[in-house]
Amino acid sequence: MEPIAREHSGVVYGISYQLLGSSETTAEATGLVFRILQMRARSLPKKKSLTPWLFQMTLIVSKQLKREKSETHSHTDSQSRLTMTEDSQRECTDLFNALTRITPQQRDSILLKFVWRIDGRDLAKTLRISETKAKRRADKGLTRLAFIIRKRKLNLDPDAIVRRLSRIADDGQMPDDLWEVIKSNSTEIPDNRRESKNIRAALRSLCWIGWKCRLKILGNLFKAGVALLLTIIALTIWFWQSGSMIPWMLESSSRKLVEEIPELAESPKPWEIQETAQDLPHKAIISSNDLYQTDLIRRAHFEFTKDQWAGLEPRHIQPINPFRLSDQMVLRNPNSTRGGLAGVLGLEFDWVHGNFEWLGRRFENIAVRYRGNGTYIGSLYRLKRSFKLDLNKYVSGQKLVGLDTFKLNNLIEDSSYMHDSLGYELFREMGVPAPRTSYVWLTIGVEGKWERRPFGLYLLIENIDSDFAEHQFGHKSTPIFKPITYDLFGYLGRNWEDYRIVYDLKTEATESQKERLIEFARIVSFASDKEFSRRIDDYLDLDKCAGFLAGTVLQSNFDGILSTGQNFYLYLDPRTNKFGLIPWDLDHSWGEFGLAGTAEIREQASIRRPWTQKNRFLERIMGVERFRKLYQDKLRSALDTHFHPHRLYSRIDELAKIIRNPIAAESSFRLRRFEQAISDVWLKGPRDGEPIGPKRPVHQLKRFISNRADSVRKQLDGKTEGIILNFKLGQN
């Protein structure tokens, strides 16, 4: 104890003197500090410097004695041999109080360097850090101390602070006899009540300071926790409002799906097309009709370099929140070059170069990119993406039977693999212009990675472009638009630019043809019922439109014009100058769209009011009696022919025979769901659950056809009203 007391007594005395100003009271304070040190020696850390403890205890004891003297009005000390002015004492008190306001690490560095005068290597050794770090900590603490003092309006700059601290031990000269008193007291028990009281009070103060530090730490931790929580909430709100959270949620959900259903990760096995089999005849491709044959499966193969394959991955742009603007899902991102959900989520599909083998021919340097919205999102848990390819983009004149652009649908959301092919076929049989289809078994080779990796069964879908227009209407110059709007033919003014984004033009149109659309929008929006009924025949091909609506209603396709405002095309037939509609993206048709009502409701959906939300265009045309009659006639005719359950059952079985083996090669999981989807034995258990994805209950095609045909016939016969769906995408 004696070496410690000799080493530190001068500094302790000097600090006390700076605060108390009289030698007698200072001596008493110094003695109390070392008496308490003797009592607490065993509880103090053995390997840490005593400097912080001595400084803290000296402040406590000095303030306590000063308060005691003040209470007894003993402000004078006749026997003091040293005196300090009150201003000087106040300045020192403020300086020491400021020292308690900086961090303990900075305070210890300052005290050791400027008061205890330990510097350089010894300072670093005492603090157990490097010399550079010790110097930096002391300098930083001094800067912080000067800032606090400046806020208290004291006239002390950093140099003055250093001088004041360095003089502490020199200014208070400890009396010669005090050391002997300290030495004798350190071994004695307090012998008077007052001294014992002061010691207890000092220890209580020290204990309270410890608790204050702990409470301060807890308070800071609480503040930090609250700040972190608020930051997380703010970032979550920002991510949600900006739309950035939704892609992350979808990707996370896809990864989780594979963990929950390991079969999803099963890779397709090689499957060779048996050209001699009766159900897969080989035929020379002479025309587009030979190319698009649903009853055939043809082999196709992509080749990419590693960079080309990597380049297929979507480029990320600024997404938007699909639900930010209204209670309906936003389907157009102003930052994207394409409409639909993928663009809204900030996904841009760029073209890459590649090679393509198909129908015994090799096409070099073609353009390929991913395509689709829901079909892309639904394929995130596996590599099977949908593709769009352009033979002519990089090599002028490279075509196949006059065609250059093709689309390969991955069929990922369709357990039956037939929704698109069967749906388009029904529309064509009902006299509605619709794309043709054919099945393709696709393999992909990536340089240095795969040679001919099987990707599975795809559906080749005719591209809606000028070639389609020539085939359907006899003119390549037929204007074809792809609307994305909940208000088809809503009037937006006289300027075509206001319509351009809503009605994405896929071919070419003259100014007069654009004006034709604007004029029809004005009539739909503002004409009286009488005027609309009188003029509707001039603008709309009622027969084709009635067939389109009847086919859509029979299939209960609520992922299109009846609900989501997308997934159809609009054309202006140059032969008649009348508008008509083309079906598109039927993977959720045949009553499968799980976001709209239940399976049973979709089977019983109303034929008189089939739209699920306000739809002025459909409301107006259904209000015209001659259109309504055409529409009902189309429904009756289809029920007796093309939509008759027996006829469709047979067609499903025919297609199943063709595509069953390649589906089996894809995976046992896909084959099992396929067999359930086309079965005429109804599955037991709930028919509804997850609205989309591989976890949802299997949608049975024949079950829907049977129940839907029965419901539509009863509604036509007036035996039932059907169920009106009130549904907005994002509100279900």
Image (cartoon, rainbow, N blue to C red):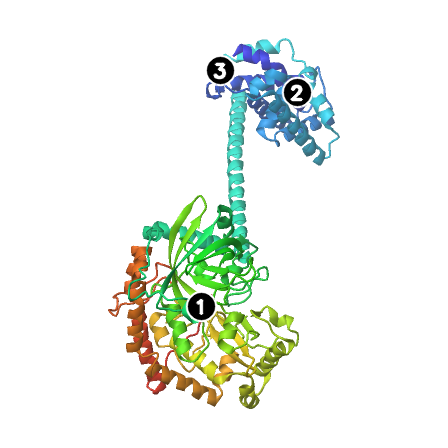
- Where residue 49 sits, quadrant-wise, is top right
Task: Give the left or right position of residue 396, taking residue 96 as reference.
Answer: left
- Where residue 508 sits, quadrant-wise, is bottom right
> Marks 1 and 3: which is nearer the front?
1
Q: Nearer the viewer, residue 717 or 570?
A: 570
Residue placed furthest toward the right:
155
Q: Is residue 304 above or below residue 417?
A: above
- Where residue 428 sits, quadrant-wise, is bottom left
Q: Tell which circle, 1 or 3, labels the residue nearer the N-terminal end.
A: 3
> Marks 2 and 3: which is nearer the front?
2
Q: What residue type is labelled 3?
A: Ile
For numbered disc 2, what is the local secondary structure?
Answer: helix
**Mark identifier at residue 114:** 2
Q: Which of 609 and 413 is in front in this view?
A: 413
For numbered disc 3, what is the local secondary structure?
Answer: loop
CA distance separating discs 2 and 3: 34 Å
Residue with the mark numbered 1: 585
**Mark identifier at residue 189:** 3
Q: Residue 407 location, x and y as percent?
A: 46, 63
